[in-house]
Amino acid sequence: MKKGLILCLSFFVLSVSSQNIQWRGTDRTGIYNETGLMKSWPEKGPEMLWHYDGLGEGHSSVAIDSDKIYLTGLSDGKGFIYVLNMDGKLLMKKEYGPEWTASYNGPRGTITVNDGKLYLISGVGDLYCLDKNTLHVVWKKNILKDYNASNIKWGINEAPLIIGDKVIATPGGKQYNMIALNKNTGQLIWSSPGEGDLSAYCSPLYISDQQTPLIVTMTANHIIGIEAATGKKLWSHENKNRHSVHANTPVYGDNMILCTSGYGRGSTMLRLTNGGKGIEEVWFSKELDNRIGAMVKVGGYAYGSGDSNRYWFCVDWKTGDIQWKEGGMAMGNIIANDGMLYCYTDKGDMILAKASPEKFDIVSRFPITMGTEQHWAHPIIYKGVMYVRHGNTLMAYQVK
């Protein structure tokens, strides 16, 4: 009995210590599962444990694996990987190659850590696989040049998706619209022509609970569903806006997929049918036009902010009915944990609110005063600490 208990506890400790945080959490939902976090913050905000200055320009978010922090930044036109420990001390820094310098400079896509390797797509389309311990390049592909695709106006912005032995990316070519490469060698496993659209700044989502597991993403003019095993296009749904920007990863729950975009588009809710092989539109709302801040599903409701429609909102997941909308503050991105919303506005305010369909129930807020340029990187929560990247600076706040 005692031996069994020790084994169970050992497994639990190992599981907690090896938690992997990628783009928008462990599963790309923006939902974190920490316990014991504060339900309100002090007037001046939670305690800042440490900050690291010197990341350079960039908008990528934090990735964490085995209690190490991974980030990217731009210096002198080159992209660098930074590896920090949990006390904010720099462990490693290494140049990986050219990065986006045409506008809103710096890396966009967040690192994905998997099986001892780092996967990263630069703004100029280089897909890297690097050894996690040495940062040496294992293999590299330029998904634009190698797969006959063109870059987009503000540079590729995609976090690689790992499914089994595959790494998924969206070059946006006519033939190689979405690709699956062997994650260990970089060899092509399958390609899908999708609808032949350009890429649209979106990081794809894997849906595993259907009869046919599938990958869902947004390209320039469509929402597409691709069979994960083969690359076969299962379905598509027209989804246009004036700049072909669809930067938010779809949100999945209750057999339905919520896809939201700004620039005059809005939100589309699709229901999966025939085990994932088909779809039907459930509702559409032009009002709910989040651009780059994402949305979260908490219970039977979705929360986020608008773009042209300058308010934060709550919407009924099943019907699309707006429960409340609240103006008077800047738009931004959103994550959630244990019934609380963490809203980071593009003016630098960090807001803590209750996830309630009754009202935008703000309980605390404080300004992010350190860092540089745009407040666009999405925060994360890990072991009771909230990590906020603002350009050149990463800040760690004690929220437990």
Image (cartoon, grey):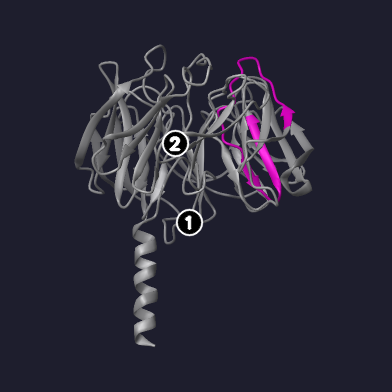
Residue at (77, 43) in percent of width and height: 319
Residue 171 or residue 6, whichever sits in front: 171
**Residue 239 lies in the magenta stretch:** yes
Query: Disc 1 to disc 2, how far (Cα)?
Result: 17 Å
**Residue 40 lies in the magenta stretch:** no
* Residue type marked 2: His
Q: Which residue is disc 2 drawn over?
A: 378
Q: Which residues are magenta?
A: 236-260
Q: Identify the secondary structure beneath mark 1.
A: loop
CB of mark 1 within 8 Å of CB of mark 2?
no
Residue 261 or residue 124, whichever sits in front: 124
Residue 228 at x, y percent in the picture: 61, 42
Residue 70 at x, y percent in the picture: 32, 40
Q: Which residue is disc 1 drawn over?
A: 33
**Mark 1 neighbour class, 10 Å CA radius: few under 14, some 14 to 19, many 20 or more:** few
Q: Identify the secondary structure beneath mark 2.
A: loop
Asked whether, in this view, residue 302 is left or right of residue 273, the answer is left
Task: Determine if residue 396 is in view.
Answer: yes
* Residue type marked 1: Asn
Task: Determine if residue 358 is in view.
Answer: no
Residue 16 at x, y percent in the picture: 38, 61
Asked whether, in this view, residue 180 is left or right of residue 3, the answer is right
Residue at (62, 25) in percent of width and height: 219
Mark nearer the N terminus (1 vs 2): 1
Question: Can you tell which quarter of the image residue 84 is in?
Answer: top left
Residue 333 or residue 159, whichever sits in front: 159
Q: Quadrant of the C terminus?
A: bottom left
Question: Can you tell which quarter of the image residue 206 is in?
Answer: top right
Above or below residue 261? Residue 303 is below
Question: Can you tell which quarter of the image residue 317 is in?
Answer: top right
Residue at (51, 21) in percent of width and height: 147
